[in-house]
Amino acid sequence: MDLPVISSTFLLTLLLGVGLFFFIRASVKDRTEEMTFRVVNSEEATLKQVQDYFEQRAYRLAKVDPENNRVTYEGFVRPSWFLASFLTLLAAIGLLCLSLVWWTVLPKGGVWFLCVLLLSPLAGWFYWKNAARPERVAVAIASAPSDRDTESESAASELEIVLIGHRDELATFRQTLHWPLK
């Protein structure tokens, strides 16, 4: 092969390897977000709904802050077998491509470059080790500022619920309870 073709292929393979490295690293990144909902309901009924939801999702009550009207739930996130296997497969494919390019650039090295494939299970191990962690969701409930004239206080008022937690958990919460976002 021509030297410019080999060197450019090697460079592109290295760049793809760097992208794969950051993809594997991002699989365990913390994705904490905040969502704010507006609900017309009593505070007790709303708290009961939130508590029932998180208990069904295997969260437990971790902390209650009555001064700020905030409750924190804690659960454990288990790693996914599928994602660990998928990341191992991606790493194997990436390392195979890299070893084939090395083999092309340095043909006298023999098939020893294929030994690099033995590193691919490290991607699954990295994910498995770092994905298993405790997850926290903080829930704060406050009365929402009303646009209407001050009327008699009723049992059901407009509440503003702020949830801070993992974005996937918040998305599931929103789909389950169908509360409108602020």
Image (cartoon, rainbow, N blue to C red):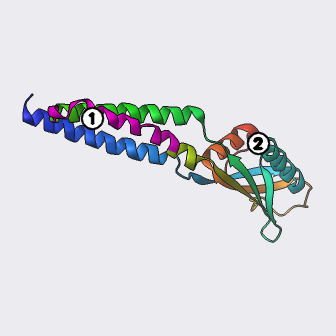
10 Å neighbourhood of mark 2: few (<14), some, or many (≥20)? few
Residue drawn at x 16%, y 35% is 105
Q: Amino acid at mark 2?
A: Arg
Give the side of residue 103 with respect to residue 118, left or right: left
Whether residue 35 is visible to the viewer of this picture, yes or no, is: no
Cα separation, mark 2 vs mark 1, equals 47 Å
Q: Is residue 71 on the magenta stretch?
A: no
- Looking at the image, the residue that sits furthest to the bottom is 67
Regarding mark 1 in the picture, which secondary structure is present there? helix
* Residue that appears at 21% across and 31% down: 110
Please state the horizontal and vertical placement of residue 97, each as a whole percent of the image: 29, 31
Q: To which residue does mark 2 refer?
A: 57
Image position, residue 36 (x, y; %) = 68, 54
**Total numbered labels placed on residues in the image:** 2
Image: magenta residue range: 106-125
Graded by Cα atoms within 10 Å as few (under 14), some (14 to 19) or many (20 or more), the crowding at tag 1 reads some
Question: Would you say the magenta stretch is mainly helix, strand or loop?
Answer: helix
Task: Indicate the secondary structure of the residue bearing disc 2.
Answer: loop
Q: For residue 129, which numbered disc appears in the image?
A: none
Q: Amino acid at mark 1?
A: Phe
Instruction: Kindly identify which residue carries mark 1.
Output: 113
Nearer-N-terminus badge (2/1) = 2
